Image (cartoon, rainbow, N blue to C red):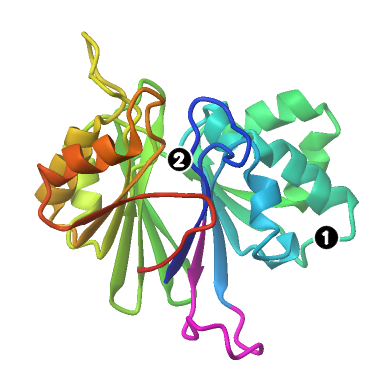
């Protein structure tokens, strides 16, 4: 599997850095030398600005699924313009694309897009509703999800392909379910949207939390993302590394990481 970082910004896109989004590709040809062997392509979180970055790497008509961790706009807003691209341009998919998302997201899209979308949206997306634990298979790629703590219905993701495992926190506070999703992950992507956790129930990780979550999961490597704007890059890596013995790096737009 290969993960390409499309954006990491929070809570709004910055020049050169869209909001949260990743391209997950499951392939038996990681070098990309065999043009006949197209990878399975999953758009993981559709934050503002990620649609444009996604097209640097694949055509939209090559999407096999979309996974949206929760309904907040910095993880889902580009679904609106993706709908226009896939329904009304030359990029129309051969069949509706599975949209794996929390309950209620499709209704929100329809409310924004207008009443015609009730009939038109199913031409583009086939909803796969997340509530509790579940999984969805795309050939040899298995996507598994479970709920995380974020103040709204939110889900972490695990992906497995031919013995390799990726885990992604979405947005959420440290929790047992995320540690379970990350168990044995070769790469774990964890957001660090807090510099310091506030009073009251947390809804994000700090860099220190991210390190502890990766350590508790037994992950091999940690990729920090969605970093609080008050945390310097080097400081985030240092703080996470104090809690996690494996490799720690910071996600940057355009990074292409083999799982």
Tell me the residue at 82%/43% (across/down).
Answer: 84
Secondary structure of the residue carrying tag 1 is: loop
The residue stretch that appears in magenta? 23-38
First in residue order: circle 1 vs circle 2: 2
Looking at the image, residue 165 lies above or below residue 13 = below
Residue 166 seen: yes
> 101 left or right of 117?
left
Label 2: few (<14), some (14–19) or many (≥20) C-alpha neighbours in 10 Å: many
> 45 left or right of 15?
left
> 28 left or right of 144?
right
The dominant secondary structure in magenta is: loop
Q: CA distance from mark 1 to mark 2?
A: 25 Å
Looking at the image, residue 210 lies above or below residue 201 = below
Residue 122, percent from left and from top: 74, 47
Tell me the residue at 37%/27% (across/down).
Answer: 228
Label 1: few (<14), some (14–19) or many (≥20) C-alpha neighbours in 10 Å: some
Tell me the residue at 10%/42% (across/down).
Answer: 242
Q: Nearer the viewer, residue 228 or 25?
A: 228
Residue 199, percent from left and from top: 21, 8
Q: Which mark is residue 69?
A: 2
Tell me the residue at 40%/33% (across/down).
Answer: 154
Residue 104 seen: no
Q: Which mark is residue 91?
A: 1
Q: Nearer the viewer, residue 78 or 118?
A: 78
């Amino acid at each position: 599997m290969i993960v390409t970082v499309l954006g990491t910004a929070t809570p709004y896109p910055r020049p050169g850095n869209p909001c949260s989004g990743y391209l997950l590709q499951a392939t038996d040809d990681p070098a990309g030398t065999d043009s006949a062997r197209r990878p399975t392509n999953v758009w993981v979180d559709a934050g503002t600005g990620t649609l444009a970055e996604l097209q640097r790497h694949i055509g939209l008509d090559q999407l096999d699924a979309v996974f949206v961790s929760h309904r907040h706009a910095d993880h889902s807003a580009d679904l609106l313009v993706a709908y226009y691209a896939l329904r009304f341009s030359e990029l129309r998919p051969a069949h509706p694309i599975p949209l794996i998302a929390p309950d209620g997201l499709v209704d929100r899209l329809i409310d924004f897009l207008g009443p015609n979308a009730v009939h038109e949206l199913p031409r583009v997306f086939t909803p796969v509703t997340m509530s509790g634990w579940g999984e969805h298979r795309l050939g040899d790629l298995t996507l598994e999800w479970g709920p995380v703590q974020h103040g709204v219905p939110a889900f972490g993701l695990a992906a497995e392909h031919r013995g390799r495992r990726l885990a992604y926190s979405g947005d959420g506070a440290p929790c047992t379910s995320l540690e379970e999703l990350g168990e044995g992950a070769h790469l774990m992507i964890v957001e660090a949207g807090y510099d310091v956790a506030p009073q009251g129930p947390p809804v994000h990780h700090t860099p220190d939390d991210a390190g502890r979550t990766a350590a508790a999961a037994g992950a091999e490597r940690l990729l920090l993302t969605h970093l609080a704007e008050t945390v310097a890059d080097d400081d985030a890596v240092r703080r996470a590394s104090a809690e996690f013995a494996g490799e720690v790096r910071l996600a940057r737009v355009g990074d292409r990481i083999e799982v």
